[in-house]
Image (spheres, rainbow, N blue to C red):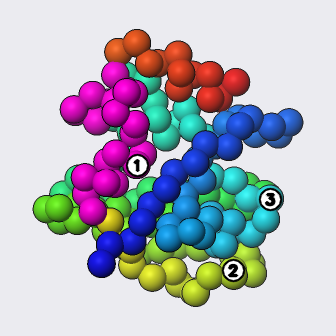
């Protein structure tokens, strides 16, 4: 059985631009790992206009920053995970969690497995993305507004 991923965009606030939050099977992974007040990646960075998103999963494993504490990742570290595609499965594994977070989730977080088609559709709505997993022409402004 696959884990269920939902990506939400939080509107910009007084301190941060619009950011993404990752909910897995009903739980905010960022808040559970970095605590209240932490943040996810900026929406404009995670969904860059005209460029492949760092959220995409490929057969090459790579580390993805999912969040940081409110004191910044430079202070206590980042919440990161290794993302890799294995055929029709996307795996998140090998978590790194910031220091002193008081995690409410299991430590370290477990490996997560997503259906690759649902994973791609979850982070990049069809109207925004082209088949090569880039922001589709004409939708750059929608992404840019997320960071204002």
For mark 2, does the 10 Å Cα neighbourhood hold few (<14), some (14 to 19), or many (20 or more) residues? some
Residue found at the very far right of the displayed protein: 14
Query: In the image, is 99 to the left or to the right of 110?
Result: right
Residue found at the very far top of the displayed protein: 138
Q: Dot 1: what SS?
A: helix
Residue found at the very far left of the displayed protein: 87
Residue 115 shows in the view:
yes
Residue 118 occupies which quadrant of the picture?
bottom left
Residue 82 occupies which quadrant of the picture?
bottom left
Boundaries of the magenta span: 115-136
Q: Dot 3: what SS?
A: loop
Mark in the foreground, 3 or 1: 1
For mark 1, does the 10 Å Cα neighbourhood hold few (<14), some (14 to 19), or many (20 or more) residues? some
The alpha-carbon separation of the residues under discs 3 and 1 comes to: 24 Å
Which residue does the numbered mark 2 point to in the structure image? 103
Query: In the image, is 73 to the left or to the right of 79?
Result: right
**Residue at x-position 40% and y-position 36%:** 125
The alpha-carbon separation of the residues under discs 2 and 1 comes to: 25 Å
Q: Nearer the viewer, residue 118 or 42?
A: 118
In percent of width and height, residue 34 lies at 69, 68
Residue 57 shows in the view:
no
In percent of width and height, residue 64 lies at 44, 56
- Quadrant where the C terminus is found in the figure: top right
Which residue does the numbered mark 1 point to in the structure image? 122
Q: Nearer the viewer, residue 76 or 6?
A: 6
Could you tell which of marks 3 and 1 lies nearer the N-terminus? 3
Which residue does the numbered mark 3 point to in the structure image? 37
- Quadrant where the N terminus is found in the figure: bottom left
Mark in the foreground, 2 or 1: 1
Residue 9 occupies which quadrant of the picture?
top right
Could you tell which of marks 2 and 1 lies nearer the N-terminus? 2
């Amino acid at each position: 059985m696959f884990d269920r991923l939902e990506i939400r965009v939080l509107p910009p606030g007084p301190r941060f631009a619009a950011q993404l939050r990752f909910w897995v099977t009903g739980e905010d992974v960022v808040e559970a790992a970095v605590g209240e007040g932490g943040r996810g990646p900026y929406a404009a960075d995670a969904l860059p206009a005209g460029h492949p998103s760092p959220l995409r999963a490929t057969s090459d494993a790579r580390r993805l920053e999912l969040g940081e504490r409110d004191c910044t990742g430079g202070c206590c570290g980042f919440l990161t995970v290794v993302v890799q595609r294995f055929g029709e499965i996307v795996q998140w594994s090998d978590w790194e969690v910031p220091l002193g977070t008081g995690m409410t989730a299991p430590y370290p977080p477990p490996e997560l497995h997503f259906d690759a088609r649902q994973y791609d559709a979850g982070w990049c709505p069809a109207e925004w993305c082209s088949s090569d997993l880039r922001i589709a022409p004409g939708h750059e402004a929608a992404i840019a507004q997320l960071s204002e």
